[in-house]
Amino acid sequence: MKAVLSPVFSHLPALSPSSWGLVFALTAAILLWLLSLRLKDASIVDIFWGPGIAGVVDIAAGMSHAGGPRTSTVLLLVNLWALRLAAHIWARHHGEDHRYGAMRIKFGANWWWLSFVQVFLLQAILIWFIPAPLVAAVLYSGMPMGWLDYAGVGIAGAALVFEALADFQLGAFRSDPANKGKVMDRGLWGWSRHPNYFGEAAMWWGFFIIGYAASHMWWLLLSPLLITTLLLIVSGVSLMEDDIAERRPGYAKYKREVSAFIPWFRKRA
């Protein structure tokens, strides 16, 4: 992996790997914003979330000429996650998501420039900051791997599979016309109402462990804490469940019985 990435970045100006990651995220945000204006679809930004984060880590690895088993493992995990997530969101993308559509209506004629600040610029900053543990892992790739690294890799890898399986189960359920209007409460969705979000959060806690094992920097905790907060309060569980009970009659019962986030035994009324 080192041999592939290093030559690409060998002739770039002497900015830090972190600075180049920010340049990448901001440039991509501007280009995506301009494309969204043409398509009238701000939700294309979601497709770039995974590849954007992976790109920041790839740039850090290439700019620092990082190598070794920690870097190879980190790059494998983050790029697999990014490709799967982007493909998943792309497959489900059929026009602008209703969340962005609601903002488009709310802000009217001002949405064209507000969308850059509220959606694209904000996401660019998150794309640059969230992978801090992974950037730290590659920048400190010279440190030998220990049990903490392997624990982080195990958690992140298992969480990645957990999230992918949850998405697959939900996709298979929705593809059956007989399930239209019904609540998905099978498989992992019988243990958690949002197992895909739980898998995503757990993966970033695993990534933090890897980054901390390499760098011993506690401030990297901000990354999984931010992701978990976003998934629970801002754009995940809270937003998804805002009106779902009105659209799916069986959801109130499902909500009483199944844990919102952390998988747990189902309560029987």
Image: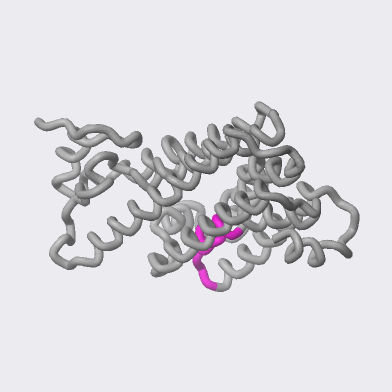
**Quick one: 108 or 44, which is closer to the camera?**
44
Read off the magenta span: 39-51
Image point 35% across, 55% down: which residue?
Answer: 167
Q: Where is the N terminus found, in terms of image quarters?
A: bottom right
Indicate the colouring scheme. one colour
Q: Which residue is drawn at 70% across and 38% down?
A: 144
Of 118 and 258, nearer the camera is 258
Vertical placement of residue 226 versus 173, above or below: above
Provide residue 106's location: percent of width, then percent of height: 46, 52
Asked whether residue 111 appears in the rendered view, the answer is no
* Residue at image location 26% in from the left, 62% down from the top: 172
Asked if residue 45 is among those painted magenta in the image, a careful observer would answer yes
| Residue 192 horizontal/vertical position (percent) | 29, 40
Q: Main secondary structure of the magenta part?
A: helix
Residue pictured at 57% horizontal, 73% vertical: 38
Quarter of the image holding residue 45? bottom right
Count of labels shown? Answer: 0
| Quarter in which the C terminus is drawn | top left
Where residue 115 appears, x then y in whole percent?
57, 55
- Whether 176 is drawn above or below 106: the answer is below
Q: Is residue 6 above or below residue 70?
A: below
Residue 18 forms part of the magenta stretch: no
From the top left corner, tell me how far across and down residue 142 is, in percent. 76, 42
Left or right: residue 31 compared with residue 198 = right
Q: Residue furthest top?
A: 218
Question: In the picture provided, is 13 more to the left or to the right than 78?
Answer: right
Q: Quadrant of residue 217?
A: top right
